[in-house]
Amino acid sequence: MKKNKSPRLILKKLILVGREKNYIVPFTVGLNIIYGDSDTGKSSILNIIDYLLGASEVFLYDEIEIHGKYGLLELELNNDTYTIKRDIFNPKSHIEVYHSSVDKMEDVFPKEYGSSFVKEGPAGYFSDFMLEALNISLVKLKQAPSKADSKMTSLSFRDIFKFCFLDQDDVGNKDILDQKNPVVFVKNKETFKFLHNLLDSQITELQEDIAEKTRIKNGIIQQFTIVSSFLREARLETTESLEGKSQKLSEELKLLDNEILQLTHNMKSNSDHDNELREIIVTKQSLLDSLTLNKMYKETQLDQNLRLKRDYQQDIDKLLASVEVIKKLPNHEGHHVNCPVCDNEMQASKFNELFSQYDSSSIELEVKSLKNRFKEVSLLIDRDRGSILDIIEEITSISTEIKKAKDMLDLKTREFVSPFLSQRDVLNTRRGEINEEIKRTDYLLKLRNQLNELTKKTDVLTEQISQLNVRMITLVEGAPSVDGVLESIADWLNEFLTFIPIRNPYGIKISDKTFLPVVRDRDYSKLTSGGLRTLVSIGYLFSLLRNSLDTDTNFPSLVMIDTVGKYIGKTKAKYLENTSQSEDNLEGINDPKKYKNIYSYLSSLSDELIGNYDFQVIVVDNDLPDSMESQLDKYIVKKFSVDERDGFEIGFINNATPRLV
C-alpha cells in the first residue's frame, strides 16, 4: 500500500490514433524521460497529454493533421483506471471517458463531458469529473479575496494543473503563473491556498462536499436498487453467466471458422480432378477466340475484294463504251450533222478533235489488263469465301466441344462442389447467428457492467467520504498554517538548489504574497539570470510534488516539464532577450555539472521514493548530460533522431518526414 496523502494522477499510456497506424507512448511511475533532436515531436507529446486533460486547444503540425485522428490517454485517478478519448480536430466536441483501460474500452459505455464550462455534456463537465475522481472538492474561489462581498468563481482542474505543467515557454519565464495578468494571478494564488488547505472557507466547503457526496451516494444506491430490481424481473443473466456465454460463443465461432476453412480446403482438393476439363475449356476457348478473329479478318478482306471487283467492272464497261463511240465516229471531216438535242448544225471535225488523242487499240489493251485483274480478284474472292466457310465449320466444331466440356464440368460441379457449398452456406448462416448472439451478449454485459459501475461508484464515494472526514478532523483539530506550508515547500526547494548547486544558496523561501520562490531574498520575477530562473522554476514544481507526498494536499502526483535544459547550455535565440547572459555567466549556468545534477537529483528522487509513493515526473529535453545515457536508460520512454539511428525513432509521427516541433 502506497503512502500518498494527496490525490494520485498517474499516466499509463498515450495513444494518438492515426489513419495508417497508432502512435503510442507508454509511461511508468517515477521518472519518465523523452529526449531527442529538435523538430521531432517531443513537445507535442506533452501538448497532447495537456489537451486530453482538458486544455482548450492543441497545436497541430502538418504530420498530425495528415496522419492523426483522435487521442487516447489511459491513466489512474486515485485507484481507478480510466481512458480519455478526445477529437484532436474539434476542441469543442465532448470528451469521452471510459471507466476502463484502453484494451477494455469496448466493454463499457462511455460518459460524455463538456470540454469547458461553456457547454455542459450529457454527463456534466470534464473538469468536475477530474476533480471528483481525484476526490478534490468542487469549490468556488473569491475573485477579490480581500473583499467580504467578492464574487465567486469555480475552481477548475485546469487551475490546479497549472502547478503541474511547465511548457517550454514557462520554464524559466519570469512571469510564471501569469503574474502580468492580475485577475488570473489572483485566482492562481487562491488555487495555491486551496491546494494546501489554506483557504479560510475550506472547512465549510469540506462539510458541504461531504454532504453533497453523501447525497449522491444515497441517490446512486437508490438508482442501483431500481435498476437491479428491473434487471432481476427481466431475468437478465448474471455477469458471470453472460461472460461464460460470451466465451462459449467465441469458442464455437472459432470452431466454425476452422470448419469453414477445412471445408474450403476439401472443396479445393476435390475439385482438382476437374482441372483437366478446365484446361481443355481454356485451350479450346483460346483457339475459338483466335478463329473468330481470323474469320473477322477474312470477312473484311472479302468485302474489300468485292468492292475492288465492282470498281474493275465499272472501269471495263466505261472503256468498252469509249471504243464503241470511236468506231462509230464519221470519217468525213466536212460532214455536217444536226445536234440531237438543240438541232443545231455540228461539224464532224469537232468530234475528231475530241477523240483523236485516243485510238481504239490502246483502250482495248487497257480493257484487257483490267479484265485480268478482275479475274485475279474473283479468284481471291472465291478463296476468301472458302476460307470463311472452313473457319465457320471449325468454329462450330470447337464450340460443340467446349459446350460438351462445360456440360461435363457443370455436372461434376453439381455432384462434387454443390454439397460443399450447401454445407458451407449452413455453416456461414450459423456463423452469422453466433455473431449476432455475441453482439447481444456483449450489449447485455455492458448493461451489467453499467450496474457494476454503480456499485464501484458507491464504493468510491464511500472511500472519498471517509477521506474527507479524516481531512475534516485534521483541519478542525489543527488547520495547517500558511507559514508552516510555505516553510515546508521552501525546505524542499532549498534541498534541490543546494544539490545543483546554485551560487550562494541563501535566502531561499516561498513568498507569502505571491506564493512563488524567493532566492537570495529576491522575488523570482526579479531574478535576471534565465538559467537561474530555470533551475528555480523546475525546483519549485518538484518541491510542490515532494511536499504533497507526505502532506494532505490537493496537489495531484504528476509533474511535466518541457524543456529542462532551457537557458542551461543551449538557449534558443527567441529566449535570449529574456535573460542576462552576463548574469548567466556569473551564475556558472554553462557548467555541465549543473545540467547533470538535475538528472542526478531526478533519478535519485525516483529510486528513493518509488517503493513508498506513487508519483510521476515526465521531462522533455533535446539531449541528455554527457555519459549519463546508460545510467538514465531505464527512465527513457522515447528517444528521437532526425537521422536513422539504432534505438531511435524518426519523430513521434514515425511514418512521415519529420517537420515537427
Image: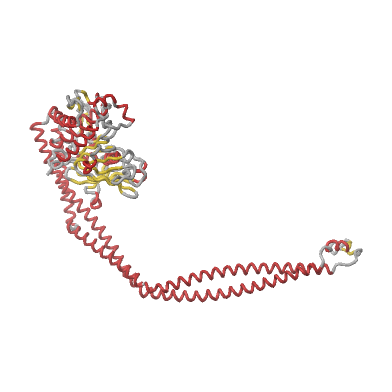
In percent of the image, x 11 and y 31: which residue is there?
Answer: 479
Q: Is residue 349 left or right of residue 423?
A: right
Residue 611 appears at what percent x and percent y? 13, 42
Residue 24 picture location, percent across and down: 28, 46
Q: Is residue 160 above or below residue 64?
A: above
Horizontally, residue 432 falls left or right of residue 558, namely: right
The residue most toward the left is 477
Left or right, 472 with reference to 377: left
Query: At 48% from the left edge and 72% from the top edge, which residue is drawn?
Result: 284
Q: Position of residue 374 (x, y in %)?
A: 70, 71
Where, by quadrant of the figure, is residue 158 drawn?
A: top left
- From the viewer's side, name the closer residue of 102 and 619: 619
Q: Quadrant of the N terminus?
A: top left
Which one is nearer the viewer's eye here, 600 or 452? 600
Residue 129 visible in the snapshot: no
Q: Total label count?
A: 0
Q: Is residue 448 left or right of residue 660?
A: left
- 50 up-or-down from 529: above or below: below
Farthest residue to the right: give it. Answer: 334
Confirm whether residue 344 shows in the render.
yes
Quadrant of res 315:
bottom right
Which quarter of the picture shows residue 311? Answer: bottom right
| Display colour scheme | secondary structure
Residue 93 x %, y %: 31, 42
Q: Nearer the viewer, residue 448 or 622?
A: 622
Which image quadrant: the C terminus? top left
Q: Residue at x 37, y 42 (%)?
A: 62
